[in-house]
Amino acid sequence: MKTQLRFRKFYLQAVLLVAGVIYLNDASSQSYENLKHLTGTELQVYYSAGHEPRAKDVATRTQNAINFTTELVGFRPEVVLLVLDPEDWKKHTSFPVYGMPHYTDKKTLIIASSDNNFWKSFIPPVEQLPASLAEKIKNTYKSGDGNISMQPFFDLLAIHELGHAFHIQAGLTMQRKWMGELFCNILLHTFIEEREPHQLDALTVFPEMVVVSGATGYKFTTLSEFENNYNVIGQKHPKNYGWYQGRLHVAAKNIFGAGGKKVIVKLWKALRSTSDQINDNQLATLLKKKVHKSVADVFVKW
Protein backbone atom coordinates (compact mmCIF):
# COMPACT_ATOMS: atom_id res chain seq x y z
CA MET A 1 0.00 0.00 0.00
CA LYS A 2 2.80 2.44 0.87
CA THR A 3 4.43 1.73 -2.47
CA GLN A 4 1.19 2.45 -4.33
CA LEU A 5 0.76 5.72 -2.44
CA ARG A 6 4.29 6.83 -3.29
CA PHE A 7 3.75 6.01 -6.96
CA ARG A 8 0.41 7.81 -6.97
CA LYS A 9 1.99 10.92 -5.46
CA PHE A 10 4.48 11.27 -8.33
CA TYR A 11 1.82 10.83 -11.01
CA LEU A 12 -0.80 13.09 -9.47
CA GLN A 13 1.57 16.01 -9.14
CA ALA A 14 2.59 15.67 -12.79
CA VAL A 15 -0.94 15.43 -14.13
CA LEU A 16 -2.16 18.36 -12.06
CA LEU A 17 0.53 20.65 -13.37
CA VAL A 18 0.30 19.59 -16.98
CA ALA A 19 -3.18 18.52 -17.96
CA GLY A 20 -5.07 21.08 -15.94
CA VAL A 21 -3.52 24.16 -17.55
CA ILE A 22 -4.97 25.40 -20.83
CA TYR A 23 -3.13 28.66 -21.36
CA LEU A 24 -1.67 31.60 -19.49
CA ASN A 25 -2.30 35.26 -20.13
CA ASP A 26 1.37 35.94 -20.62
CA ALA A 27 2.73 39.43 -21.11
CA SER A 28 6.02 38.16 -22.55
CA SER A 29 7.25 39.66 -25.80
CA GLN A 30 6.22 37.82 -28.94
CA SER A 31 9.49 38.67 -30.68
CA TYR A 32 11.50 35.55 -31.47
CA GLU A 33 14.67 37.28 -32.68
CA ASN A 34 16.85 35.44 -30.16
CA LEU A 35 15.51 32.05 -31.30
CA LYS A 36 16.24 29.93 -34.34
CA HIS A 37 13.47 29.44 -36.90
CA LEU A 38 12.90 25.85 -37.98
CA THR A 39 12.39 25.57 -41.72
CA GLY A 40 10.84 22.75 -43.72
CA THR A 41 7.72 22.44 -41.57
CA GLU A 42 4.15 23.66 -41.93
CA LEU A 43 4.15 24.88 -38.35
CA GLN A 44 5.72 28.07 -37.09
CA VAL A 45 8.49 26.59 -34.95
CA TYR A 46 11.17 28.49 -33.03
CA TYR A 47 13.84 26.89 -30.89
CA SER A 48 16.82 27.63 -28.69
CA ALA A 49 20.23 27.43 -30.34
CA GLY A 50 21.75 23.97 -30.22
CA HIS A 51 18.44 22.11 -30.06
CA GLU A 52 17.47 21.70 -33.71
CA PRO A 53 17.14 17.87 -33.58
CA ARG A 54 14.80 18.14 -30.60
CA ALA A 55 12.80 20.89 -32.33
CA LYS A 56 12.42 18.72 -35.43
CA ASP A 57 11.19 15.76 -33.39
CA VAL A 58 8.64 17.83 -31.45
CA ALA A 59 7.51 19.65 -34.59
CA THR A 60 7.02 16.38 -36.46
CA ARG A 61 4.81 14.86 -33.76
CA THR A 62 2.86 18.08 -33.28
CA GLN A 63 2.26 18.49 -37.00
CA ASN A 64 1.28 14.85 -37.33
CA ALA A 65 -1.21 15.22 -34.48
CA ILE A 66 -2.67 18.37 -35.99
CA ASN A 67 -2.95 16.82 -39.45
CA PHE A 68 -4.46 13.63 -38.07
CA THR A 69 -7.07 15.43 -35.97
CA THR A 70 -7.84 17.95 -38.71
CA GLU A 71 -8.65 15.09 -41.08
CA LEU A 72 -11.04 13.70 -38.50
CA VAL A 73 -12.89 16.84 -37.38
CA GLY A 74 -12.47 19.24 -40.31
CA PHE A 75 -10.88 22.06 -38.32
CA ARG A 76 -7.25 23.20 -38.11
CA PRO A 77 -6.11 25.38 -35.21
CA GLU A 78 -3.29 27.87 -35.47
CA VAL A 79 -0.33 26.77 -33.36
CA VAL A 80 3.06 28.39 -32.82
CA LEU A 81 5.58 26.03 -31.24
CA LEU A 82 8.48 27.17 -29.07
CA VAL A 83 11.11 24.61 -28.01
CA LEU A 84 13.13 26.35 -25.33
CA ASP A 85 16.15 25.86 -23.11
CA PRO A 86 15.97 27.18 -19.52
CA GLU A 87 17.34 30.63 -20.37
CA ASP A 88 15.00 31.22 -23.30
CA TRP A 89 12.12 29.83 -21.23
CA LYS A 90 12.51 32.79 -18.85
CA LYS A 91 12.36 35.20 -21.78
CA HIS A 92 9.24 33.81 -23.46
CA THR A 93 6.96 32.62 -20.67
CA SER A 94 6.17 33.74 -17.15
CA PHE A 95 5.43 30.19 -16.04
CA PRO A 96 8.02 29.43 -13.34
CA VAL A 97 8.41 25.65 -13.79
CA TYR A 98 10.76 24.69 -16.60
CA GLY A 99 9.58 21.54 -18.36
CA MET A 100 5.80 21.89 -18.21
CA PRO A 101 4.06 22.05 -21.63
CA HIS A 102 1.66 25.00 -21.67
CA TYR A 103 0.22 27.84 -23.72
CA THR A 104 1.16 31.49 -23.26
CA ASP A 105 -1.94 32.40 -25.26
CA LYS A 106 -4.51 30.47 -27.26
CA LYS A 107 -2.03 29.38 -29.91
CA THR A 108 1.56 29.51 -28.58
CA LEU A 109 2.65 26.16 -27.14
CA ILE A 110 5.81 26.04 -25.03
CA ILE A 111 7.91 22.85 -24.86
CA ALA A 112 11.17 22.18 -23.00
CA SER A 113 14.20 21.40 -25.14
CA SER A 114 15.72 18.78 -22.83
CA ASP A 115 15.30 16.64 -19.75
CA ASN A 116 15.10 18.64 -16.55
CA ASN A 117 14.72 18.52 -12.78
CA PHE A 118 10.96 18.92 -13.00
CA TRP A 119 10.58 15.75 -15.08
CA LYS A 120 13.13 13.93 -12.94
CA SER A 121 11.18 14.78 -9.78
CA PHE A 122 8.40 12.44 -10.92
CA ILE A 123 10.58 9.37 -11.29
CA PRO A 124 9.29 6.88 -8.70
CA PRO A 125 11.77 5.24 -6.31
CA VAL A 126 12.11 2.05 -8.32
CA GLU A 127 14.32 0.41 -5.70
CA GLN A 128 11.32 0.51 -3.34
CA LEU A 129 8.84 -0.92 -5.83
CA PRO A 130 7.91 -4.56 -6.45
CA ALA A 131 10.30 -6.09 -8.96
CA SER A 132 7.67 -6.52 -11.68
CA LEU A 133 6.48 -2.93 -11.44
CA ALA A 134 10.01 -1.55 -11.28
CA GLU A 135 10.90 -3.49 -14.42
CA LYS A 136 7.86 -2.14 -16.26
CA ILE A 137 8.74 1.43 -15.34
CA LYS A 138 12.35 0.94 -16.40
CA ASN A 139 11.33 -0.54 -19.73
CA THR A 140 8.71 2.12 -20.38
CA TYR A 141 10.64 5.22 -19.41
CA LYS A 142 14.24 4.22 -20.10
CA SER A 143 16.26 6.87 -21.92
CA GLY A 144 19.07 6.32 -24.39
CA ASP A 145 21.70 6.43 -21.64
CA GLY A 146 19.94 3.71 -19.67
CA ASN A 147 18.50 6.00 -17.01
CA ILE A 148 14.80 6.65 -16.36
CA SER A 149 13.35 9.77 -17.95
CA MET A 150 9.79 11.06 -17.84
CA GLN A 151 10.26 12.92 -21.12
CA PRO A 152 8.13 10.41 -23.11
CA PHE A 153 5.17 11.01 -20.79
CA PHE A 154 5.46 14.81 -20.81
CA ASP A 155 5.92 14.92 -24.58
CA LEU A 156 2.66 13.03 -25.04
CA LEU A 157 0.80 15.30 -22.64
CA ALA A 158 1.70 18.16 -24.98
CA ILE A 159 -0.71 16.54 -27.47
CA HIS A 160 -3.39 16.79 -24.78
CA GLU A 161 -2.78 20.54 -24.87
CA LEU A 162 -3.35 20.52 -28.64
CA GLY A 163 -6.83 19.26 -27.86
CA HIS A 164 -7.52 22.48 -26.02
CA ALA A 165 -6.33 24.49 -29.03
CA PHE A 166 -8.81 22.61 -31.21
CA HIS A 167 -11.90 23.10 -29.07
CA ILE A 168 -11.09 26.65 -27.91
CA GLN A 169 -10.25 28.03 -31.35
CA ALA A 170 -13.24 26.27 -32.92
CA GLY A 171 -15.53 27.75 -30.27
CA LEU A 172 -17.01 24.47 -29.08
CA THR A 173 -19.30 24.50 -26.08
CA MET A 174 -17.76 21.78 -23.93
CA GLN A 175 -20.78 21.59 -21.58
CA ARG A 176 -18.71 20.53 -18.57
CA LYS A 177 -15.18 21.14 -17.33
CA TRP A 178 -14.59 17.40 -17.08
CA MET A 179 -15.74 17.06 -20.68
CA GLY A 180 -13.06 19.51 -21.79
CA GLU A 181 -10.42 17.33 -20.16
CA LEU A 182 -11.92 14.05 -21.36
CA PHE A 183 -12.11 15.38 -24.92
CA CYS A 184 -8.38 16.16 -24.90
CA ASN A 185 -7.54 12.75 -23.46
CA ILE A 186 -9.65 10.98 -26.10
CA LEU A 187 -7.90 13.01 -28.80
CA LEU A 188 -4.50 12.15 -27.33
CA HIS A 189 -5.22 8.46 -26.94
CA THR A 190 -6.74 8.20 -30.41
CA PHE A 191 -3.67 9.76 -32.01
CA ILE A 192 -1.28 7.46 -30.15
CA GLU A 193 -3.31 4.33 -30.96
CA GLU A 194 -3.56 5.24 -34.63
CA ARG A 195 -0.19 6.83 -35.34
CA GLU A 196 2.27 5.96 -32.56
CA PRO A 197 1.12 2.72 -30.92
CA HIS A 198 4.66 2.05 -29.72
CA GLN A 199 4.10 4.94 -27.26
CA LEU A 200 1.06 3.39 -25.57
CA ASP A 201 2.95 2.22 -22.50
CA ALA A 202 4.48 5.67 -22.03
CA LEU A 203 0.99 7.13 -22.09
CA THR A 204 -0.87 4.60 -19.97
CA VAL A 205 1.42 3.21 -17.24
CA PHE A 206 0.99 6.12 -14.81
CA PRO A 207 -2.79 6.57 -15.16
CA GLU A 208 -3.45 2.86 -14.73
CA MET A 209 -1.46 2.83 -11.50
CA VAL A 210 -3.48 5.78 -10.19
CA VAL A 211 -6.78 4.00 -10.77
CA VAL A 212 -5.54 0.76 -9.25
CA SER A 213 -4.49 2.59 -6.08
CA GLY A 214 -8.09 3.66 -5.42
CA ALA A 215 -9.75 6.84 -4.13
CA THR A 216 -9.40 6.36 -0.37
CA GLY A 217 -8.75 9.63 1.44
CA TYR A 218 -9.94 11.99 -1.28
CA LYS A 219 -12.48 14.66 -0.39
CA PHE A 220 -13.99 14.83 -3.87
CA THR A 221 -14.72 11.77 -6.01
CA THR A 222 -17.82 12.43 -8.16
CA LEU A 223 -17.97 14.28 -11.47
CA SER A 224 -20.48 16.76 -10.06
CA GLU A 225 -18.04 17.56 -7.26
CA PHE A 226 -15.29 18.04 -9.84
CA GLU A 227 -17.54 20.38 -11.81
CA ASN A 228 -18.71 22.43 -8.85
CA ASN A 229 -15.31 22.65 -7.15
CA TYR A 230 -12.95 22.72 -10.12
CA ASN A 231 -10.82 25.67 -8.99
CA VAL A 232 -10.88 24.67 -5.33
CA ILE A 233 -9.72 21.14 -6.15
CA GLY A 234 -6.98 22.41 -8.42
CA GLN A 235 -5.67 24.98 -5.94
CA LYS A 236 -6.19 23.26 -2.59
CA HIS A 237 -6.43 19.53 -3.37
CA PRO A 238 -3.82 18.86 -6.08
CA LYS A 239 -3.59 15.11 -5.52
CA ASN A 240 -7.38 14.86 -5.68
CA TYR A 241 -7.33 16.74 -8.99
CA GLY A 242 -4.67 14.38 -10.32
CA TRP A 243 -6.81 11.39 -9.37
CA TYR A 244 -9.61 12.77 -11.57
CA GLN A 245 -7.17 13.21 -14.44
CA GLY A 246 -5.95 9.64 -14.02
CA ARG A 247 -9.53 8.38 -14.19
CA LEU A 248 -10.14 10.41 -17.35
CA HIS A 249 -6.97 9.07 -18.98
CA VAL A 250 -8.08 5.51 -18.36
CA ALA A 251 -11.60 6.37 -19.53
CA ALA A 252 -10.17 7.67 -22.81
CA LYS A 253 -8.32 4.40 -23.32
CA ASN A 254 -11.51 2.39 -22.69
CA ILE A 255 -13.53 4.65 -24.97
CA PHE A 256 -11.12 4.12 -27.85
CA GLY A 257 -11.22 0.40 -27.23
CA ALA A 258 -14.99 0.42 -27.45
CA GLY A 259 -15.53 2.77 -30.37
CA GLY A 260 -12.24 3.50 -32.12
CA LYS A 261 -11.37 6.78 -33.81
CA LYS A 262 -14.99 7.46 -34.80
CA VAL A 263 -15.74 8.50 -31.23
CA ILE A 264 -13.68 11.71 -31.33
CA VAL A 265 -15.41 12.67 -34.60
CA LYS A 266 -18.89 12.08 -33.19
CA LEU A 267 -18.02 13.89 -29.95
CA TRP A 268 -16.72 16.88 -31.90
CA LYS A 269 -19.90 17.07 -33.99
CA ALA A 270 -22.16 16.67 -30.95
CA LEU A 271 -20.41 19.43 -28.99
CA ARG A 272 -20.27 21.75 -31.99
CA SER A 273 -23.99 21.34 -32.67
CA THR A 274 -25.03 22.08 -29.08
CA SER A 275 -24.16 25.67 -28.25
CA ASP A 276 -26.59 26.06 -25.34
CA GLN A 277 -25.88 24.60 -21.92
CA ILE A 278 -27.87 21.42 -21.36
CA ASN A 279 -28.82 19.60 -18.17
CA ASP A 280 -27.41 16.28 -16.97
CA ASN A 281 -30.15 14.13 -18.47
CA GLN A 282 -29.83 15.88 -21.82
CA LEU A 283 -26.06 15.50 -21.76
CA ALA A 284 -26.25 11.78 -20.98
CA THR A 285 -28.75 11.28 -23.81
CA LEU A 286 -26.65 13.31 -26.25
CA LEU A 287 -23.52 11.31 -25.47
CA LYS A 288 -25.27 7.95 -25.71
CA LYS A 289 -27.25 8.61 -28.89
CA LYS A 290 -24.93 10.93 -30.81
CA VAL A 291 -21.47 9.83 -29.66
CA HIS A 292 -21.02 6.41 -28.01
CA LYS A 293 -22.35 4.59 -24.98
CA SER A 294 -18.82 4.34 -23.57
CA VAL A 295 -18.63 8.14 -23.38
CA ALA A 296 -22.02 8.39 -21.72
CA ASP A 297 -20.90 5.72 -19.26
CA VAL A 298 -18.09 7.95 -18.01
CA PHE A 299 -20.82 10.31 -16.83
CA VAL A 300 -23.56 7.84 -15.91
CA LYS A 301 -21.41 5.16 -14.26
CA TRP A 302 -18.59 7.25 -12.79
Image: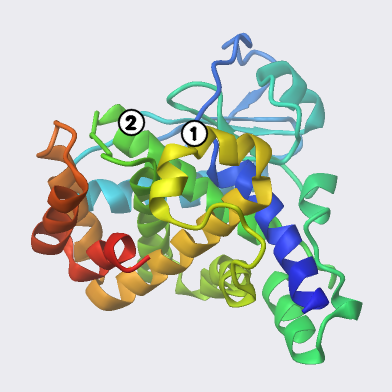
Snapshot quadrant of residue 194: bottom left
Q: Residues within 10 Å of mark 2 (few under 14, many from 20)?
A: some
Q: What is the C-alpha distance between the residues marked 2 and 1?
A: 9 Å
Q: Does 49 sit left or right of 146 as displayed?
A: left
285, 229: nearer the viewer: 229
Q: Give residue 266's position: percent from left, percent from top.
A: 15, 56
Q: Tell me which amino acid carries mark 2.
A: Ile
Q: Give residue 40's position: percent from left, percent from top.
A: 46, 38
Q: In the image as oriented, which residue stretches furthest toward the right?
A: 127
Q: Does 291 sit left or right of 178 as displayed?
A: left
Snapshot quadrant of residue 295: bottom left
Q: Residue at x 41, y 63 (%)?
A: 189
Q: Which mark is residue 168?
A: 2
Q: Tell me which amino acid carries mark 1.
A: Ile
Q: Give residue 71's position: percent from left, percent from top.
A: 21, 51
Q: Give residue 15's position: percent from left, percent from top.
A: 61, 51
Q: Does 113 sit left or right of 218 as displayed?
A: right
> Does the residue at mark 2 contact the one at mark 1 (Cβ under 8 Å)?
yes
Label 2: which secondary element: helix
Label 1: which secondary element: loop
Q: Is residue 146 visible?
A: yes
Q: Does 159 sit left or right of 165 as displayed?
A: right
Q: In the image as oriented, which residue stretches furthest toward the bottom?
A: 132
Q: Residues within 10 Å of mark 1 (few under 14, many from 20)?
A: many
